[in-house]
Image: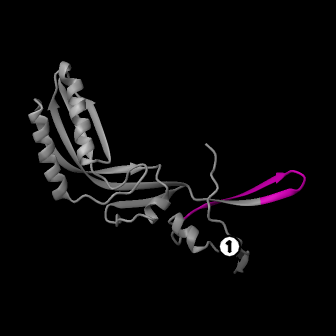
Amino acid sequence: MGWVEDSVTFRGAIRRSGNSLVITIPAELSQRFLLREGQELVIYGLSRKGPEFEGSLQVYLGCFVVHEKAPTTVFMVKVSGDKLRHFQEVVRGLEAKYLPSNVNISKLEEDLVKVELVFGAITPTAIRRVRVMEEVNSAAAEMEFALVSSGFEVVEKAIVEKIIEWRIIDPAMLSKASYKISEVVRWRWEI
């Protein structure tokens, strides 16, 4: 996958600082990439020859890694083989109603299925408001009732806080988020 040129560009000048040369990064770029003072980076010298010789400096920040603490409901449900399709429909209905950021379904044994509904603020395409634990507790009780009402036996129910790692999030999504998510999100550039 190739690089995509960012919409924010600027013209600058190289200055001297002691024995080094420095370049100023404008506020727009530092906010867009969530840069911090003292952050490590790698600088590559690039050149190409065409009709003329051209030079470039690439400042490589690394991979943007986000860790999100998200409340997660976990259900262990008995589902016989002939009811698996109906079970998936019920879970899709719960997903449409409660809008979790992620749903994981896995079959553990012959008739035991584990369903995790993650109620995080981050999705691959947007930032949502942070869900409070009381809201997730209420939703979990309603989801358990919906599963039991649909003829399934809920063997175990738990609400846990899970750490989700994201490596596909553009830092601009976090810097421009309309919701305060700093309490549940930690991020870093990883070289």
Return the residue nearer the eye: 25 or 11: 11
Magenta segment boundaries in residue numbering: 40-55
Q: Position of residue 79 (x, y in %)?
A: 16, 26
Q: Residue at x 56, y 71 (%)?
A: 28
The percent coordinates of residue 66 (x first, y second) are: 42, 55
Q: Residue furthest top?
A: 82
Label 1 SS: loop
Quarter residue 13 falls in: bottom right
Residue 183 lies left or right of residue 188; in this view the side is left
For label 1, the crowd category at 10 Å Cα-Cα, with few meaning under 14, some 14 to 19 and many 20 or more, is few
- Is 111 drawn above or below residue 94 in the view shown? above
Answer whether residue 13 is magenta in the image: no
Q: Residue at x 14, y 52 (%)?
A: 138
Residue placed under numbered mark 1 in the picture: 23
Figure quadrant of the C terminus = bottom right
* Quadrant where the N terminus is found in the figure: top right
Magenta span has 50? yes
Q: Residue at x 41, y 54 (%)?
A: 126
Colour scheme:
one colour
Residue 43 to residue 100: above or below: below
Q: Position of residue 63 (x, y in %)?
A: 52, 53
Query: Could you tell me what secondary structure mostly forms the magenta stretch?
Result: strand
Q: Give the residue type that dot 1 points to.
A: Ile
Where does residue 111 sit, x and y in percent of width and height? 17, 23
Judged left or right of residue 71, residue 68 is right
Q: Is residue 33 visible?
A: yes
